Amino acid sequence: LTGLIGVIIITLLLVYLQSMRIYIPITLPRYGGIKSRVPLQFLYVANIPVLLVGILFSNIILFNRLASAYSVPYLSSFLRTLAFYMSPPRHGYELLINPARVLIYAGLLFALGILFGFMWIEVSGLSPSGQAEQLIKSGLEIPGVRRNPKILESLLAKYIYPLTLISSIIVCAISLFADLLGTYGGGIGILLAVGIIQQYYTMIAYEQALEMYPLLKRFIGEE
């Protein structure tokens, strides 16, 4: 029962957080200076940091099993220690039984999650420089700011870097909280499932909007 309640709580919390947006005011010169806003997701990096951490932890646990199976003494001992601290807690009672392991796991989760969050925005084009370049290519302007990539980049950095840090911490905290609640599928599993469902919902809503309002295709540059 606790696991089911945990799934419901985490799912509702994620849906709420993923619906939150930070808006940046813009103008569209090509359409007579129409004013609008560009939304940035509050969970800017979504569930990517936690997924990357989960992949890293899973690989180390796998290597530990392989090293144990082939009897590699020193490597096996080292990987066994890493795997022990990188295995997620299965319930809150582990805080009482082995608090050191839970705290070390949490420290690794948050540290690597933040690192992967910042790495992700750089490689995926979500960095301030990538977003500034996209705004300029789209013909959008921020009121009172010159169309200079460096100026736009410095302005967007005030939004993007704090959002990256905060969203990385939040998704790591949700994942850890879900593990401590003993939810079905674990924290990373729930984050992945909710993320996939949210993406499909967004895609369907986007396609329906284009079908209902064909002029939107020209407006967003698809025609």
Image: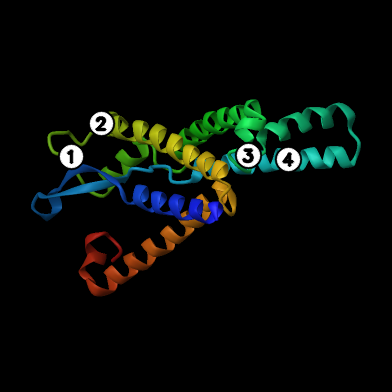
- Give the number of the mark in front: 2 or 4: 4
Q: Which residue is labeled 3 in the image? A: 89
- Give the number of the mark in front: 1 or 3: 3
Q: Residue at x 54, y 51 (%)?
A: 2
Q: Residue furthest right?
A: 71
Comparing 124 with 41, the one in front is 41
Give the mark nearer the N terminus: 1 vs 3.
3
Q: CA distance from mark 1 to mark 4?
A: 48 Å
Give the mark nearer the N terminus: 2 vs 3.
3
Q: CA distance from mark 1 to mark 3?
A: 46 Å
Residue 61 is marked as 4
**Residue 141 x %, y %:** 18, 42
Q: Which residue is labeled 2 in the image? A: 155
Q: Residue at x 51, y 41 (%)?
A: 177
Residue 165: image quadrant is: top left
Q: CA distance from mark 2 to mark 4?
A: 42 Å
Task: Classify mark 2: helix, strand or loop.
Answer: helix
Give the mark nearer the N terminus: 3 vs 4.
4
- Give the number of the mark in front: 3 or 4: 3
In this rendering, is residue 104 above or below 52? above
Residue 164: image quadrant is: top left
Comparing 97 with 130, the one in front is 97
In this rendering, is residue 183 above or below 109? below
Q: Residue at x 38, y 43 (%)?
A: 43
How crowded is the residue under tag 2: few (<14 C-alpha within 10 Å), some, or many (20+)? some
Q: Which residue is labeled 1 in the image? A: 142
Give the mark nearer the N terminus: 1 vs 4.
4
Task: Classify mark 1: helix, strand or loop.
Answer: loop
For the residue marked with disc 1, what is the amino acid?
Ile
